[in-house]
Image (cartoon, rainbow, N blue to C red):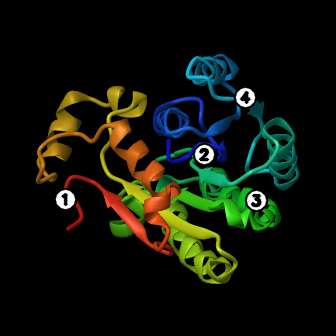
């Protein structure tokens, strides 16, 4: 298995894309910490699924928008797994509203969780990753096509995800010479609990914009992330991998 011996932290790993990523990393041999904010039951279910594969796993609660909590998460991950070689920044929230109706709290919550959380965890994990650089240290940040094209009603979310893309490129330049590779995955319309709750008419309209004519699957994002964490991606850094069925081309 190409990720045997790797120690991974997946933020927001209890459901949706984060859950899929955590399971795929484990399938390829990594031990994984599942970070969650509130849904402990879902996080423990992922942990049990990973342990059933023969991997080490633990669920750790932390609000990554809080700098101190993010630092404690990193320390707890290292203690639980005996190290850290892979960081996947996936945690995020939405507070969709048109700009004129968007409250300052809506803006701050999305920016601080999605973009601030990415900074909070990566900044405090960087020294640990540096100590493990000879073991294939990787950072993969989950952005969105919303950060590439902008989506009405998502000024906060689009801004945060665009910020993650810029953050990825800057940090990749800083850490590349230190053998830490930093990349970004930007999903399009992916079939998750969030999209399941959307009205069918809205989904049908969205799908008209996708050349592939279907929703993406969580596994398609997870496999892209796992590839970036593996040896085959050893000469890739600072890149944005768009997985959107052709939506933004």
Q: Is residue 172 left or right of residue 96?
A: right
Q: Are marks 4 and 3 in contact (CB under 8 Å)?
A: no
Q: Nearer the viewer, residue 168 or 95?
A: 168
- Residue bearing the label numbered 2: 91
Q: Are marks 3 and 1 in contact (CB under 8 Å)?
A: no
- Quadrant position of residue 239: bottom left
Q: Secondary structure at mark 3?
A: helix
Q: Name the spot of residue 123 as percent of width and height, x first.
A: 77, 65
Q: Name the spot of residue 148 as percent of width and height, x first.
A: 37, 68
Q: Looking at the rendered structure, which numbered label has been put on residue 52?
A: none
Which of the marked residues, 3 or 1, is nearer the chain's N terminus? Answer: 3
Which of the marked residues, 3 or 2, is nearer the chain's N terminus? Answer: 2
Residue density around tag 4, few if under 14, some if 14–19, many if 20 or more, within 10 Å: many
Residue density around tag 3, few if under 14, some if 14–19, many if 20 or more, within 10 Å: many
How far apart marks 3 and 1 lie (CA) works out to 32 Å
- Residue bearing the label numbered 1: 246
Q: Name the spot of residue 34 as percent of width and height, x first.
A: 66, 34
Q: Are marks 2 and 1 in contact (CB under 8 Å)?
A: no
Which of the marked residues, 4 or 3, is nearer the chain's N terminus? Answer: 4
């Amino acid at each position: 298995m190409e990720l045997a011996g790797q120690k991974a932290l997946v933020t927001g790993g209890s459901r949706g894309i984060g859950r899929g990523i955590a399971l795929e990393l484990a399938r390829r041999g990594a031990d994984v910490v599942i970070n969650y904010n509130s849904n402990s039951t879902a996080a423990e279910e992922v942990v049990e699924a990973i342990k059933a594969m023969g991997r080490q796993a633990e669920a750790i609660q932390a609000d990554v928008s809080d700098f101190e909590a993010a630092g404690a998460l990193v320390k707890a991950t290292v203690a639980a797994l005996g190290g850290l070689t892979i960081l996947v920044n996936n945690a995020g929230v939405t507070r969709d509203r048109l700009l004129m109706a968007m409250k300052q709290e809506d803006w701050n919550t999305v920016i601080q969780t999605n973009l601030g959380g990415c900074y909070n965890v990566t900044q405090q994990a960087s020294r640990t990753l540096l100590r493990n650089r000879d073991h294939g240290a990787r950072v993969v940040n989950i952005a969105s096509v919303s950060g590439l094209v902008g989506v009405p009603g998502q000024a906060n979310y689009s801004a945060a995800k665009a910020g993650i893309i810029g953050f990825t490129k800057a940090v990749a330049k800083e850490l590349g010479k230190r053998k830490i590779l930093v990349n970004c995955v930007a999903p399009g319309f992916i079939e998750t609990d969030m999209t399941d709750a959307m009205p069918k008419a809205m989904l049908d309209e969205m799908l008209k914009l996708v050349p592939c004519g279907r929703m993406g699957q969580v596994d398609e994002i997870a496999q892209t992330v796992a590839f970036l964490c593996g040896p085959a991606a050893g000469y890739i850094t600072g890149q944005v991998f768009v997985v959107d069925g052709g939506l933004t081309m």
